[in-house]
Each structure stands twice: as C-alpha cells, then as structure tokens.
Image (spheres, grey):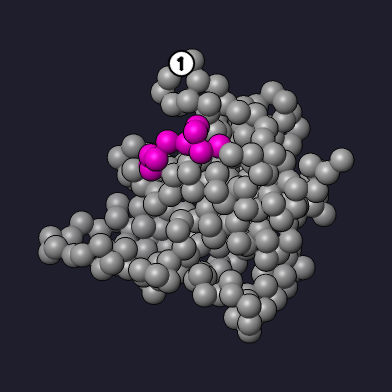
C-alpha cells in the first residue's frame, strides 16, 4: 500500500464566517475513503479545532491569546473528532485521535512511542487523525503550524507523499489575485521560490504559503513527494490521483527523482 499524509488546513474546513464547513469536511472524508479503497494508507493531519471551539462558545470576559487557544482548542477538538468519527463511520472506517507536541519528534522514547502508536493503528486499519495538542502547546513548544507537523509526520512514518490542502491552487508566479499569475506546476526540491512567495496568512490558520513552501522543500529533500493543492476544489484528492495533469497544483519533486 502507498502511504500518504494529507494535511487539511483551517482555511479549507471553515467558511468565511469562521464556522466549520461540514459539507466540505464530508466531501474530504468521502475522498479519503476512496483512497483507502484504492490501496492508499492515509494519515490525516487536520486543523480546525480552534475555529471549531470559537464558533461554539461566546465569552464575555477578556482572555489572552494563550487562554483563548487553550479554551477553544479543548472544546473544538472534541467537536472536530466527533464529526470525523460520524462521517468516517458511514464508510465503515475506524478512526483514532493522535494529539501531539513538537517535543515528540525529537529523538528518544517519545518519538519511538508515537511512531509505534501510529504504526499499530495503520496495521489494524485504523485511520490516524493527527493534530497539535493546543491545550498544552504554547510559545516555544508549538509547531510553526500544522504544515510543519504534517511534514514531520510524513518523515517519521516514511510516507511516499505529502499533500497539503489549502485555499489556493498552489504556488503562483505572482500574486494569486493577479489574473496574469499562473500556478507553478512543478519544482525541484532545491529550487528557490522566495521571489514568488507573499508573506500572507489565512484568516483562520497560523501558517502561510512561505511556511508551506519551506516545509515542502524540506520534506522533498528527504525523498518524499509533496503536493500543494486547493482543498476547496471538488474531488481534489481523487483527481490528483486519477487525473493529475488536469488539475492545478504545485508538485515538489523529491531529491531522488532529481538524480541523473
């Protein structure tokens, strides 16, 4: 089976009002179920917990950013994993929750335990749903964003491919808002894209395209193919597998494929 890590960003899972887009979430679940039926072993890294919690609770007292993150993530993660559970159950797919922290990716017992946990889940047909443990991950303990988490997860689990789903079609050779800009379809792992990357972040997520590009190059340098694509596009995951030449995306060609 081909092992892939799929990261779904908050900007894919939420509507413009900040509330969870259950219809989009259901569509992504349907596509992951299709992948599993076609011999793909999937690890899902899903954002959305903080946005989920923020839409559930309206607080009157003023909380600082850390308190808000802890409160909303604690509430939102429960709702998020519950929705995933119900949606995947319609496909007879068992899911398991993995909440992790950056320190778990350092060499040592925590790294080995985490890898062993996810391995035994995959061996028994359980789909791992991974997110940062926002209730305890603060300041220097935090991942840059879930792009970094998904990259580390792909490397830890020796995935063949990492797919980063965002709200644009890939990396553009200019501003995505400029009608003359075009998506860069393919780049080698060591190609400098800094001139094309804008320092913009989505309203819901912590990361941006600069983060995605940096993570993608790092992961591709380790021999893993990376794709950045639009998670709001209908049937995106299936089309990336069945009709990759017909759907816009940016592929980072891994280091091995760059050898003569």
Give the residue number, with chain letter if any, for mark 1: 179
- Classify residue 36 as left or right of residue 212: right
Dot 1: few (<14), some (14–19), or many (≥20) neighbours within 10 Å?
Answer: few
- Classify residue 57 as left or right of residue 211: left
In the picture as drawn, the residue positioned furthest to the bottom comes out as: 109
The location of residue 84, given as percent across then percent down, is: 53, 55
At x 74%, y 37%, the residue is 241
In the picture as drawn, the residue positioned furthest to the right comes out as: 260
Q: How many marks?
A: 1
**Dominant secondary structure of the residues highlighted in magenta in the image:** loop
Q: Which quarter shows the N terminus?
A: bottom right
* Residue 197 magenta: yes
Residue 84, placed above or below residue 38 = below
* Residue 104 magenta: no
Residue 242, placed above or below residue 224 = above
The location of residue 236, given as percent across then percent down, is: 62, 34
Which quadrant of the view contains residue 77?
bottom left
The location of residue 248, given as percent across then percent down, is: 62, 27
At x 50%, y 32%, the residue is 196
Please tell me which residue lies in front, 191 or 257. 191
- Classify residue 5 as left or right of residue 15: right
At x 64%, y 39%, the residue is 191
Please tell me which residue lies in front, 147 or 189. 189
Q: Is residue 18 visible?
A: yes
Q: Which residues are magenta?
A: 193-202
In the picture as drawn, the residue positioned furthest to the left comes out as: 61
Residue 74, placed above or below residue 34 = below
Identify the element where label 1 is drawn: loop
């Amino acid at each position: 089976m081909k092992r892939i890590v799929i990261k779904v960003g908050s900007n894919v899972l939420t509507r413009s009002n900040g509330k969870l887009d259950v219809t989009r979430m259901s569509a992504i679940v349907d596509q992951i179920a299709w992948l599993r039926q076609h011999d793909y072993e999937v690890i899902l890294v899903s954002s959305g917990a903080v946005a989920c919690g923020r839409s559930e609770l309206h607080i009157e007292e003023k909380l600082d950013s850390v308190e808000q993150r802890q409160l909303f993530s604690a509430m939102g993660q429960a709702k998020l994993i519950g929705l995933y559970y119900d949606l995947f159950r319609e496909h007879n797919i068992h899911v398991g929750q993995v909440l992790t922290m950056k320190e778990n990716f350092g060499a040592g017992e925590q790294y080995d335990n985490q890898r062993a946990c996810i391995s035994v889940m995959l061996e028994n047909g359980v789909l791992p749903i991974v997110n940062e443990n926002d209730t305890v991950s603060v300041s220097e303990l935090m991942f840059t964003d879930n792009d970094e988490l998904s990259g580390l997860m792909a490397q830890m689990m020796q995935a063949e491919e990492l797919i980063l789903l965002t709200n644009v079609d890939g990396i553009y050779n200019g501003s995505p808002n400029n009608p003359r800009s075009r998506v860069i379809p393919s780049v080698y792992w060591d190609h400098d894209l800094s001139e094309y990357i804008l320092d913009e972040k989505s309203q819901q997520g912590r990361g941006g395209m600069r983060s995605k590009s940096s993570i993608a190059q790092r992961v591709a340098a380790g021999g893993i193919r990376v794709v950045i694509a639009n998670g709001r596009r209908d049937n995106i995951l299936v089309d990336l597998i069945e009709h990759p030449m017909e759907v816009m995306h940016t592929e980072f060609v891994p280091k091995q494929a760059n050898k003569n």
